[in-house]
Amino acid sequence: MKITNKNDIPLALAVWLLHDEYDYIKEKNYFSVTGLMKPTRHLIIPPRLDQSQLEMDLDDMIARALGHAIHDSIEKAWRMGYKAPLKRLGYTDTQIDRVMINPTDQELEEANAAIPIYLEQRMYRQIDVDGVTYIIGGKFDMVTEGRVNDTKSTSAWSWAGHDKDEEHIRQLSIYNWVDKDAYADVDCTQRIKPKIHQEVGQINYVFTDWQRAMAKTAKDYPETRVKSRMLPLEDPEEIEKIIVAKIRELKRYWNAPESTLPLCSDKELWLSDPQYKYYSNPNNTTGRSTKNFSTLIEARTHLAQKGKGVVIPQPREAKRCGYCPAFEGCSQKDKYL
């Protein structure tokens, strides 16, 4: 894939944006937790594309790089220097001495009243679907007190609107499903004990666009730059049914024509809400609208009450399409361009 630098990002940052230490797994019949979360088109189309003919700009890598930087920094703090911060937070020496970072099952059994903290642990689980064995693998961010954690760097408005709660619950729930019968290696030979014991997960948010003024005035806007939210985990048996259905769908459509692939849902597209703009002066619709409405009925009712003006429907934006690796080979996105 060709890399472009249309906005002249300096070399020091360009190298940072392109640097990638992620431990990709390329085993046959392997699916990652995050992969199972993606739309079917997102998974099937990219391997069909000629990567040499595609390009990506450095601008498009900024969000990913920031997310990785935050995760790496959190992991480093816990691995290399957690004692002094815990002391400053008021924990006793006795409590701090009980903390163990990524202990093995044996180390945990031999310890006295240990407090295990698990960081960036990859685990695997086998599942049979129609006579074929698949491996599902995932690396959670953190498990503390038996509760699975995931850190998200995101917009503050996603907190206010609960836009991603369903997606986050599903991700944490699949981690929990894997953990129930987990192995430490992709060949599934070294079994490990479950680490997740709570029926709720925790999402830790770092807001990249947080504004102090908005926190004081906007309803439901997060009052601080970092927040957490507890989310109930889905039943592991239901999660297994969802995983099986996803694998079957991928098998069914893997070699099917692009036009026959299942369409991404509105949620999967991150489709913006409908909006209808009312302009009191029908001859001046290029500037700011007089009033906005979420339904056409409301907009037309307002127009009728005013007795003048015009209502202009706004095209809904499929926000995910701009980040999708299937973009060049997907016909569904043409509807939103």
Image: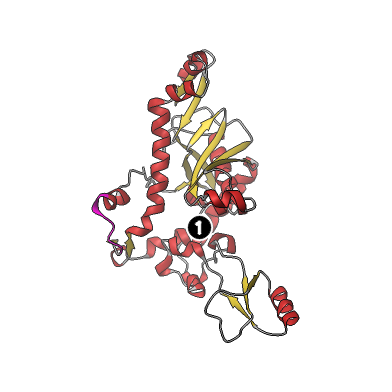
Residue at image location 40% in from the left, 51% down from the top: 64
Mark 1 crowdedness (10 Å alpha carbons): few <14, some 14-19, many ≥20 = some
The residue located at (54%, 58%) in the rendering is 249
Can residue 65 be seen here? The reply is yes
Amino acid type, mark 1: Leu
Q: Is residue 102 above or below residue 203?
A: above
| SS of the residue under disc 1 | helix
Task: Point out the stretch of residues depicted in magenta.
Answer: 7-12
Q: Within the magenta stretch, is there residue 70? A: no
| Left or right: 326 in relation to 171 | left
Drawn side of residue 90 relative to residue 6, left or right = right
Is residue 14 found left or right of 156 in the rendered image?
left
Of 266 and 81, which appears nearest the observer?
A: 81
> Residue 200, located in which quarter of the rendered image?
top right
> x, y percentage for residue 279?
62, 79
Can residue 8 be found in the magenta stretch?
A: yes
* Residue ranking furthest to the left: 11
Task: Say which of 1 and 218 sits in front.
Answer: 218
Residue 263 rendering spot, x and y as whole percentages: 55, 66
> Quick one: 307 or 209, which is closer to the camera?
307
Viewer-side residue, 53 vs 272: 272
Can residue 185 be seen here? The reply is no
Q: Quadrant of the N terminus?
A: bottom left
Q: Label the magenta part by its dominant secondary structure.
A: loop
Report which residue position mark 1 lands on. 250
Residue 290 picture quarter? bottom right
Q: Name which residue lies at 54% across and 35% down.
A: 179
